Amino acid sequence: MITQEKINELNTLLKDAKPSEIIQKAFELNKKAVVTTNFRPYEAAILHAVASVESAIPVVWCDTGYNTPQTYRHAEKVIKDLNLNVFLYVPKQTSSHRDVVMGIPSVDAPEHALFTEQVKLEPFKRAMEEHKPKVWFTNLRQGQTAFRDSIGIFSVSKDGVLKVSPFYYWSDADLDTYLEENKLPNEFKYFDPTKALENRECGLHA
């Protein structure tokens, strides 16, 4: 496992580096990597950046089953345009079945933890167990949640995987420019059934 001292060193060394340089460094550390996505806004940036360095990288898509039609159309376009190597993971129970027995509980409801486990955490754990990555690329950014403000470009997940966020210090405006320069689409009609507020942590990272 990478030490916290090494993490701190990487975060200091690469604080002002380009995303491509950060991605290259991560691959130098270990080539057994995945990039995760849910095709929320600005996800095309991380997918383009990582695939530009390693086109065959496994792209883990954990689909809750509650995405909007716009998100599904956006996902199909990005997958096709970037020729992504996608591995799709979905809950073991359909959303239609769950709507009957549970619905979408509010964040204060006792069923919310079970709901989050079913639609997000279990598929993610299954994906990570199958791929067993040493490096996990993600599009976490400073300013999204209090937890994310504390981690830096490089961090270690609770399971000991090196988590790399190449766009960590980028603003929405910066990403808008990146998408425009690389002719990448974006889509804002996105729905996360586990979060009532935009700045609520999703459960995969904390």
Image (cartoon, rainbow, N blue to C red):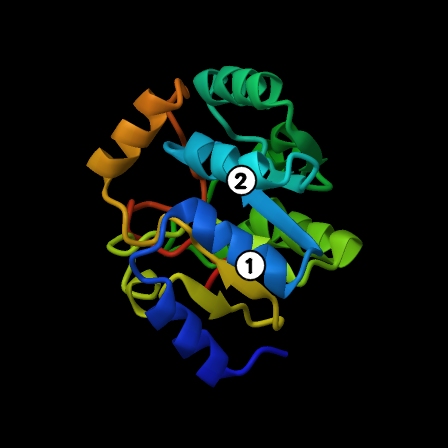
Q: Earlier in the sequence, mark 1 or mark 2?
A: 1
Q: Where residue 101 sits in the image (x, y, percent)?
A: 61, 39
Identify the element where label 2 is drawn: strand
Q: Residue at x 28, y 56 (%)?
A: 142
* Relative vertical location of residue 73 with respect to residue 5 in this rendering, above or below: above
Q: Where residue 2 sits in the image (x, y, percent)?
A: 58, 78
Crowding around mark 1 (Cα neighbors within 10 Å: few <14, some 14 to 19, many 20+) is: many
Identify the element where label 1 is drawn: helix
Mark 1 lies on residue? 26
Q: Amino acid at mark 1?
A: Ala
Q: Amino acid at mark 2?
A: Thr
* Relative vertical location of residue 129 with respect to residue 175 in this rendering, above or below: below
Q: Residue at x 35, y 54 (%)?
A: 17
The reply to whether residue 188 is in sight is: no
Location of residue 16 (image quadrant)? bottom left
Is the C terminus in the top left, top right, bottom left or bottom right quadrant? bottom left
Q: Nearer the viewer, residue 187 or 99?
A: 187
Crowding around mark 2 (Cα neighbors within 10 Å: few <14, some 14 to 19, many 20+) is: many
Q: Distance of mark 1 from mark 2, alpha carbons?
A: 18 Å
Q: Where residue 124 sits in the image (x, y, percent)?
A: 64, 51
Mark 2 lies on residue? 37
Q: Nearer the viewer, residue 144 or 177?
A: 177
Viewer-nearest of labels 1 and 2?
A: 1
Is the N terminus in the top left, top right, bottom left or bottom right quadrant? bottom right
Q: Where residue 196 sits in the image (x, y, percent)?
A: 33, 45
Q: Residue furthest right?
A: 130
Q: Nearer the viewer, residue 16 or 140?
A: 16
State the count of labels.
Answer: 2
**Marks 2 and 1: in contact by CB < 8 Å?**
no
The reply to whether residue 84 is in sight is: yes
